Image (tube, rainbow, N blue to C red):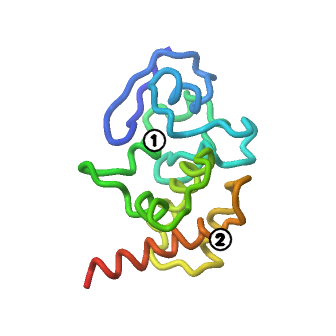
Amino acid sequence: MKIGFRLNGAETTVDVTPMARLLDVLREDLRLTGSKEGCGEGECGACTVLIDGKAVNSCLVPVVQVRGASVKTVEGLAEDGRLHPVQQAFIDHGGAQCGICTPGFVVAAAELLERDPNPDAVTIREALAGNLCRCTGYQKIVDSVARTLASAEEAGR
């Protein structure tokens, strides 16, 4: 079945089984491998993407559900060859460990900052609660999101 949707700003059509997982279509058919499969059960957040601006676990979404929707992956966060500020903050402040969970955290953080441009640490932790990391105690991840805000303020001065 042909299914059309907007992917990272471009109209895309795939010819796949309607119940194929969005994660598999992104990784296997469209070769966007940023979203990772951690658990396959919607528990870890490694496969987080934005669908119509909302963070969702792509391992739980049948591709047919994104027909006509806008999907943004971690690859789509960068614009004009420049990393998204959250991506840059994760690099600059050690938010990435092994890298499996990083795309999901980055996408979830970008969604948070879009709807709340000045969250406190508690809000950041709540927004990222659906993402699991096995390598760290989360502090560097939270710090990276918080530093995104500080970097934006410094750039504005």
Q: Position of residue 56 (x, y in %)?
A: 60, 48
Would you name the residue on which mark 1 appears? 71
Tell me if mark 1 has few (under 14), some (14-19) or many (20+) residues whose alpha carbon lies within 10 angstroms of its own.
many
Q: Residue at x 55, y 27 (%)?
A: 64
Residue 57, disc: none
Instruction: Kindly state the secondary structure of the residue where label 2 is placed.
Output: helix
Q: Position of residue 109 (x, y in %)?
A: 53, 62
Q: Residue at x 75, y 47 (%)?
A: 43
Compared to residue 24, the image places residue 73 above or below, namely below
- Dividing the picture into quadrants, the one containing residue 23 is top right
- Quick check: 36 left or right of 79? right
Compared to residue 56, the image places residue 129 above or below, namely below
The three-letter code of the residue at mark 1 reads Val
Compared to residue 80, the image places residue 4 above or below, namely above
- Quick check: 47 left or right of 72? right
The three-letter code of the residue at mark 2 reads Gln
| Residue sticking out furthest to the bottom | 157
Q: Position of residue 153 (x, y in %)?
A: 35, 81
Instruction: Kindly state the secondary structure of the residue where label 1 is placed.
Output: strand
Query: If you read the primary sequence from the N terminus, does the residue marked by circle 1 or circle 2 appear first?
Result: 1
Judging depth in this view, the residue of 98 and 61 nearest the camera is 98
Foreground tag (1 vs 2): 2
Judging depth in this view, the residue of 109 and 54 nearest the camera is 109
Would you name the residue on which mark 2 appears? 139
